[in-house]
Amino acid sequence: MSGALTARSDNFNRSDSTNITASGFNWEELRGDWQISSNRLSTGASSSTYPLAVIWVNTQNANTRCGQGASGWGWGASFWVVDQDNWFAATTDQYSYTYSYQYTFQGCPSGYSNYNCGGVCSQYAPWGGDPGHGCASCGCGGCFTYLSGPVGTGCPNGGFIVTSNYLGNGQDECAICGSTANFGTFTGTATATGYRHRLILRKSVSGTVSTVATSSEIDTSEGARPSYVNVVTSGNTATITAPMDNNTGTLTINYNGGVNDNKGLKVGVTLSPTSGGGAASTVDNFEYSPGV
């Protein structure tokens, strides 16, 4: 074959099979065993082994895109692939982190009491609020807390179940509320979990895998993922983009490879380890077109 392979795409919408080839697509399973499963390209190989499926496109300059699979991270596009031990791959990644923040809240208004007696009442509601406390609509005696049994049991007379599960151990708290109080305005500190998303560019040289670059990070929801990973190669450069599927931004890597990189004539899809999010086992909607 002379010249670059013409543009084509594969959405993997065909019968489940261990044979992943299709008209116009002579897929090569370089690393791991791949199959068609539920209209996606799937593998049972561990992401730590860098599963890799490619097509020969006869050009180093190409536009390559891999779409998200059923779930997880670590999926992406492979490019400049020579063989199973020499390749480049751009894949998605997510990790979680804990951070502290301050908030201002108001004590219980007239007719309410604070169920934990600590001045922590973040909203005027009879059930739990942020960060797990609430106001109890009561009007008698003092205010005490009791550990209850299963939901709906265990509260002494005059109390009720607060279902915020504030103790975090599968049990609830009971509020025994009394004289109405207004505790004024308070500043509290709480912790929360955040999620950061990024792209990781790796290369394998003679079977040794190393990280070449990482993108800037986007903080967004746990379940958000890039819609696809797109790689445009031209000469010694690779421009990699991945827009988040909840419109919170686009992850980007601009790589200037240099003349010493071993750049092959194959592109495809791959999986790689992820820092914290669940590892993907499927990819979808592969697209290729020759570059300039």
Image: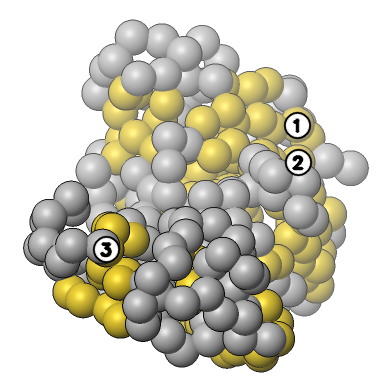
Where residue 42 sits in the image (x, y, percent)?
Answer: 34, 34
* Residue 253 found in image quarter: bottom right
Instruction: Looking at the image, tell me whether mark 1 or mark 3 is earlier in sequence order.
Output: 3
* Residue 18 found in image quarter: top left
Which label number is shown at residue 200? none
User: Do callouts 1 and 2 mark residues in contact (Cβ within 8 Å)?
Assistant: yes
The residue under label 1 is: 289
Instruction: Looking at the image, tell me whether mark 1 or mark 2 is earlier in sequence order.
Output: 2
Q: Is mark 3 on a helix, strand or loop?
A: strand
The residue under label 3 is: 159
Residue type (three-letter) at the residue carrying disc 1:
Ser
Residue type (three-letter) at the residue carrying disc 2:
Asn
User: Do callouts 1 and 3 mark residues in contact (Cβ within 8 Å)?
Assistant: no
Q: Nearer the viewer, mark 2 or mark 3?
A: 3
Which residue is painted at 28% across and 78% down in the image? 145
Residue type (three-letter) at the residue carrying disc 3:
Gly
Q: How crowded is mark 1: few (under 14 residues within 10 Å), some or many (20 or more)?
A: some
Give me the C-alpha separation between circle 2 and circle 3: 65 Å
Which label number is shown at residue 63? 2
Where residue 202 sits in the image (x, y, percent)?
Answer: 55, 70
User: Which image quarter holds the C terminus?
Assistant: top right
Q: Which residue lies furthest to the right in this view?
A: 292
Residue 235 can be seen in this image = yes
Q: Is mark 1 on a helix, strand or loop?
A: strand
- Residue 119 higher or lower than 114, as above or below: below
Which residue is painted at 69% across and 32% down in the image? 288
- Residue 227 higher or lower than 1, as above or below: below
Q: Is mark 2 on a helix, strand or loop?
A: strand
* Residue 70 found in image quarter: top left
Give me the C-alpha separation between circle 1 and circle 2: 5 Å
Q: In this view, does 245 lie to the left or right of 18?
A: right
